[in-house]
Image (spheres, rainbow, N blue to C red):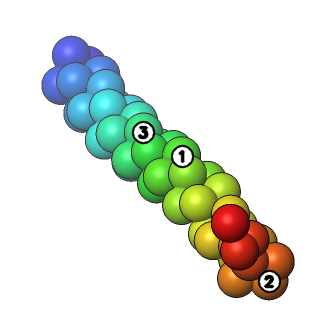
Amino acid sequence: EKRQLDDKLSRKESELEIVRHELNQVKEFRKKKTQMQKELEEVKYPSFL
């Protein structure tokens, strides 16, 4: 029974690591998206200062 619980815990830890990685990817995407939107606005409406 202990072995089964250890296996289950190990699987859950792996799943958690995958979820953390995906969350980090989402955060990175949001940062890049914001930057890309700013760049797009600058291209659409260049400011000649």
Q: Outermost residue, bottom direction?
A: 44
Left/right of residue 44 with respect to residue 25 in the rendered view: right
Residue 36 sits in quarter: bottom right
* Residue corresponding to mark 3: 20
Three-letter code, disc 3: Arg
The image shows residue 47 at horizontal and vertical percentages of: 74, 71
Three-letter code, disc 2: Lys
* Residue corresponding to mark 1: 27
Which residue sits at x=44%, y=45%?
Answer: 24
Task: Give the distance between the C-alpha atoms of the residues marked 3 and 2, in whole angstroms.
Answer: 36 Å
Task: Give the distance between the C-alpha atoms of the residues marked 1 and 3, in whole angstroms.
Answer: 11 Å
Q: Secondary structure at mark 2?
A: helix
* Residue corresponding to mark 2: 44
Which of the two labelled residues, at mark 2 and mark 1, occupies the earlier sequence position? 1
The label number, if any, that marks residue 46 in the structure image: none
Task: Give the distance between the C-alpha atoms of the residues marked 2 and 1, in whole angstroms.
Answer: 26 Å
Q: Nearer the viewer, residue 8 or 13?
A: 13
- Examine the rendering and report whether any part of residue 25 can be seen: yes
Which residue sits at x=55%, y=51%?
Answer: 31
Which residue sits at x=42%, y=39%?
Answer: 20
Left/right of residue 19 with respect to residue 31 in the rendered view: left
How many other residues sit within 10 Å of disc 2, few (<14), some (14-19) or many (≥20)?
few
Residue 13 sits in quarter: top left
How many other residues sit within 10 Å of disc 3, few (<14), some (14-19) or many (≥20)?
few
